[in-house]
Amino acid sequence: MIGSFLYILFSGVAYGVLLFLMSAGLAVTQGLMRFANLAHAAFAMLGGYLAVTLMNGYGWPFLLTLPVAAFGTAIFAAVLERVLFRRFYNVSQLYQIMLTVGIVSMSAAAVTFIWGPTNQPVTMPAYLSGSSNVGGFSVDHYRLFLIVAGGLVVWGLIWAIDRTSFGAKIRAAVDNRRVAMSCGINVDRLFMSSFFIGSALAGLGGALSINLIGLSPTFAVDFLALVLIVVTLGGQGSMKGTLGAALLLGVLDVAGKYYIPQTGPFITYAVTVVVLFWKPNGLFVPA
Amino acid sequence: MTTIELPASPAPASAAASRAHRVFARSARWRWEEIAFWVLAAASIVVFPTHLVLIAQVLITGLFALSFDLLVGYAGIPSLGHAAFFGLGAYTAGLLARAGWGEPISGLLAAALVAGIFGLVLSVVVSRLTGIALIMITLGVGLLLYEAAHSARDLTGGDDGLSGITMWPVLGQFQFDFYGRTAVIYTFVVVFLLYLVARRIVNSPFGLELKGIRENVRRVPAIGIPLRYRYMVAFTLSAALAGVAGALLAQITQTVALSSLGFDRSASVLIMVMIGGMGTLIGALVGAAAYMVAQDQLSALNPVYWDFWVGLLLVLFVLFARGGLIGGVDRLVVWIQSKRKRS
């Protein structure tokens, strides 16, 4: 009983960290520009494929592929933002949705064309595979690595948002973009840099998720919903809210699969819909 | 629902009323694109007797896109889960027929009722939301229904879908035949009648209010229109129409596939309405026809490339041609007219 509970908590938190990495960027950019970027999960997918290519094609060690996956994804996303997305900040949200749905559709096809339709095989280095027994409780090495590494990134992010002037500017602009601009904050540049960082996190999340979730061309569509759920439940623009929502969803998902495996993701969607009925602006926002 | 009764001959009393009357009369006029579409649709039934099932499916998808246009193009409510209503209608009609009641028209009404009630319940929440939360709830409900239908194998057949649907003759007279003759005429009549209904709705004062909401959400309540109730009515109507479309597909194909609830259907209807031209009604039908015929012709290609080109098309339309095909044709006509005037 205790054992299975700990297992669910452990795996759930590991999964939640991944969800957080993939959603954090969207939470900030959504909060800043109210831009409905449904293609954010496609950035995570790109990060995953970059990592796989470097590992399987060029024999890079796994840890070294992570920064490249993050950076490569960020550059790609930044170009997309400058060329396409920025034209859509002041138009109806409908067009933003159409634009990004189109990009998701193209990304799935392009990835299939380049890497094929099948699941990408990866082999993790020895120190990240297997598990050890700690006091009668089996600790999976990779999940432990995720929690530690992801926890560091999370801590760094929250620290940056809370304590640096960059973070203060972001909080100000999320609160009220116009007033922030009139105080001399260059919101356009702020947005560009947070878009860059957010996409890098998504790429990192994508690369880290291969070993746990697998990587195939349906990744962007599969995670589109989950990422949106995290951001909506967390409340736009709030790092801590996003983190809470991601961890909650991670644990919920693992628990659902453990206790009632036949329902699949049904539990997650049901809880989300019920919560949104109750608190439409997010779980951690006073309604 | 508020509808306007256009006074036939006696002129309205005040000048303002007469101006309003003229505006409604002008917007209610049949455009040549509409006439062309319906004439071509009717002609295609005669000209392509081997493609009757495809024609019926194009019309059904057109009706689905029409219901989506009412929501997106008029009320300006984005949705990523519109297939939920289509699938609900399809399963309602399918289950009803399997339970032993195969009368088609009451099946359509039942589907409209179920989908409409579901839409009404959902609209209570949707009308309170904006932005990404709104997209999320529509997407979430769509996925939820899909997973529910997927799990409830005993009721829906799960992955295998619902089969063994037997339909009674339409109006007790016309048996569904192997070639799809009855199916296509039945579909044509139903979709055309509902098109007239939708036309009537958007050209009524209620339709004008919806357009007002789309153009400026803040100003509409300021002139005394209860925003929430308009949202709810629009959402419910759109859901009911989508339910009828699903029911039609279930009845004429005598199966219900799980994909009728799928995300792909919700996404493709977005594309159809964008390609055809949002907020024009006929654009939804034209877009659905263009999409379906292209898909049918290109099905020999790998479906993956289809996704790519469709995505690219969507991006290009949203970048350069937000009026869609109908908007493009309109611009062309205006351009030609202005040229003729100059010369």
Image (cartoon, helix red, strand yellow):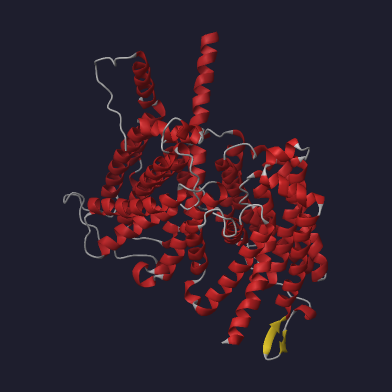
The structure residue drawn at horizontal position 72% and vertical position 83%, both measured from the top left corner, is A130
Q: Nearer the viewer, residue B185 or B299?
A: B185
Residue at the extreme left: B172
Quadrant, the C terminus of chain A: bottom right
B258 up-or-down from B266: above or below: below
Please tell me which residue lies in front, A266 or B322: A266
Residue B226 is situated, as x and y percent measured from the top left of the image, at 41, 38
Residue B191 in percent (x, y) is at 32, 42
Please, which residue is most extreme toward the front here?
A286
In this rendering, position of residue B17 left or right of residue B77: left
Q: Is residue B67 left or right of residue A141?
A: left
The reply to whether residue B160 is visible in this rendering is yes
Quadrant location, the N terminus of chain A: bottom right
Q: Quadrant of residue B198?
A: top left
Q: Residue at x 69, y 41 (%)?
A: A177
**View extreme (bottom): residue:** A136
Tally of numbered tags: 0
Q: Residue A182, position in %: x, y? A: 74, 35
The percent coordinates of residue B29 (x first, y second) are: 36, 24
Q: Is residue A154 above or below residue A180?
A: below
Q: Quadrant of residue B167?
A: bottom left
Give the camera-side residue of A198 and B172. Answer: A198
Depicted B340 relative to depicted A28: above or below: above
x 34%, y 50%: residue = B116
Q: Is residue B229 above or below residue B328?
A: below
State whether residue B203 appears in this view.
no
- Residue depicted at 31% across the width and 34% down the height: B2
